[in-house]
């Protein structure tokens, strides 16, 4: 698990005046993310990791960690609209994956409720709702992928998560991942 010194984190937040940056992790360039916030959005992703990178289908686990900064308190519900697109090798085009059985490009009514459901499965995960002002750290959390994912899922994906609150747009993050056999 990596540790970030608070001074370094504050410097990173201060340098992020436009709230648009991209972080590329070392590896096979399978994973990257960037903020897609507007200047007034209260939620900002500070750090996001996905391991392994690229995601390997033969492994049964995926590990995520996340640090988010909130500039105002957000009360539930906090809906999330998730858009997942699969990249094709055909002229760089991609296509949107539809929502089927809560998988794919779906809208979640409340990320707080979703977090509480995952917390029941993983005691390492901490959910605080309402989201208070300040930094929120979600430590490395393991997600079981299972063995039944077909090889046809290999490839590159673009993912966008848009968060809203009662007050309006709350935050946005875009990811690119790569899945290999």
Image (cartoon, helix red, strand yellow):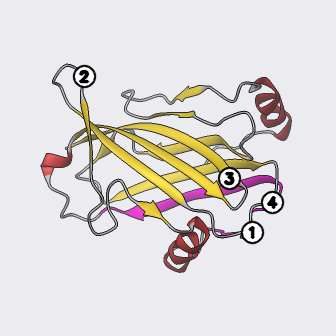
Q: Are the residues at dot 4 and dot 1 in contact (C-beta closer than 8 Å)?
A: yes
Tell us which disc is closer to us: 4 or 3: 3
**SS type, badge 1:** loop
Give 93 or 129, whichever is nearer the viewer. Answer: 93
Q: Which mark is residue 168?
A: 3
Packing grade of label 1 (10 A; few <14, some 14-19, many >=20) is few
Packing grade of label 4 (10 A; few <14, some 14-19, many >=20) is few
Q: Are the residues at dot 3 and dot 1 in contact (C-beta closer than 8 Å)?
A: no
Q: Find disc 1 in the rendering and name its residue.
A: 130
Measure the C-alpha gap from mark 4 to mark 1.
7 Å
Residue 104 in the image: state x and y as whole percent.
32, 56
Residue drawn 34% across the image and 67% down it: 102
> Relative to 104, does residue 23 appear above or below in the rendering?
above
Q: Give the range drawn in magenta.
A: 125-145
**SS type, badge 4:** loop
Q: Residue 138 carries which label?
A: none
Q: Find disc 2 in the rendering and name its residue.
A: 92
Packing grade of label 3 (10 A; few <14, some 14-19, many >=20) is few
Q: Quadrant of the C terminus?
A: top left
Measure the C-alpha gap from mark 4 to mark 2.
40 Å
Give 134 or 95, whichever is nearer the viewer. Answer: 95
Measure the C-alpha gap from mark 1 to mark 2.
40 Å
Q: Are the residues at dot 4 and dot 3 in contact (C-beta closer than 8 Å)?
A: no
Q: Find disc 4 in the rendering and name its residue.
A: 73
Measure the C-alpha gap from mark 3 to mark 1.
15 Å
* Among the two numbered marks 4 and 1 on one chain, the one whose residue lies closer to the N terminus: 4
Residue drawn 40% across the image and 47% down it: 83
Q: Are the residues at dot 1 and dot 2 in contact (C-beta closer than 8 Å)?
A: no
Tell us which disc is closer to us: 2 or 3: 3
């Amino acid at each position: 698990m990596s540790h970030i010194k608070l001074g370094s984190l504050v410097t990173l937040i201060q340098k992020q005046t436009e709230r648009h940056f991209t972080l590329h992790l070392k590896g096979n360039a399978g994973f990257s993310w960037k903020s897609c916030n507007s200047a007034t959005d209260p939620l900002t992703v500070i750090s996001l990791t996905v391991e392994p990178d690229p995601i390997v289908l033969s492994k049964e686990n995926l590990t995520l960690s996340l640090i988010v900064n909130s500039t105002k308190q957000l009360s539930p519900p906090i809906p999330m609209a998730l858009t997942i697109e699969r990249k094709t090798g055909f002229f760089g085009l991609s296509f949107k994956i539809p929502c089927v059985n809560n998988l794919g490009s779906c809208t979640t009514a409340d990320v707080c409720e979703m977090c509480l459901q995952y917390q029941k499965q993983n005691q390492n995960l901490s959910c605080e709702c309402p989201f208070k002002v300040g930094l929120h750290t979600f430590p490395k959390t393991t997600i079981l992928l299972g063995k039944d994912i077909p090889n046809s899922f290999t490839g590159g994906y673009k993912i966008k998560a848009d968060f809203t609150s009662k007050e309006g747009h709350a935050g946005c993050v875009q990811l690119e991942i790569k899945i290999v056999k």
